[in-house]
Amino acid sequence: MDKWMELLISWLPFLVLMGLWFLFARRSGMQARGKSGTTMIELYEQQVEESRRMNANLERIAAALEKREKP
């Protein structure tokens, strides 16, 4: 039991520092705002939506080209 306490006490400062680092990294990363005031998550969602629109347009173009090639 004494060995476990020594191990816990020796690792405690490292675990606290890692916890603080994780907390600050998460707060700054998830709440990061650009000049427009949008969060990184909102920017990612906009990018995903734009990719979906682009894919839909490309599928329409491909379908039109296939239709044109068929006699």
Image (tube, grey):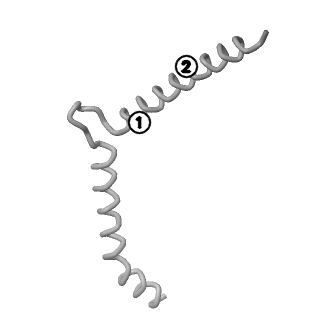
Q: Is residue 19 left or right of residue 60?
A: left
Above or below — where is 31 with respect to 60?
A: below
Farthest residue to the bottom: give it: 2
Residue 69 percent location from the top left of the image = 73, 15
Q: Amino acid at mark 1?
A: Tyr
Q: CA distance from mark 1 to mark 2?
A: 20 Å
Residue 16 percent location from the top left of the image = 32, 69
**Image quarter of the C terminus:** top right
Q: Earlier in the sequence, mark 1 or mark 2?
A: 1
Above or below — where is 40 with respect to 1?
A: above
Q: What's the mark number on residue 57? A: 2
Read off the residue under disc 1.
44
Q: What residue is drawn where x is 38% and y is 79%?
A: 11
Q: What's the mark number on residue 7? A: none
Q: What residue is drawn where x is 28% and y is 56%?
A: 24
Kind of element beneath mark 2? helix
Residue 17 percent location from the top left of the image = 30, 69
Judging depth in this view, the residue of 26 and 39 nearest the camera is 39
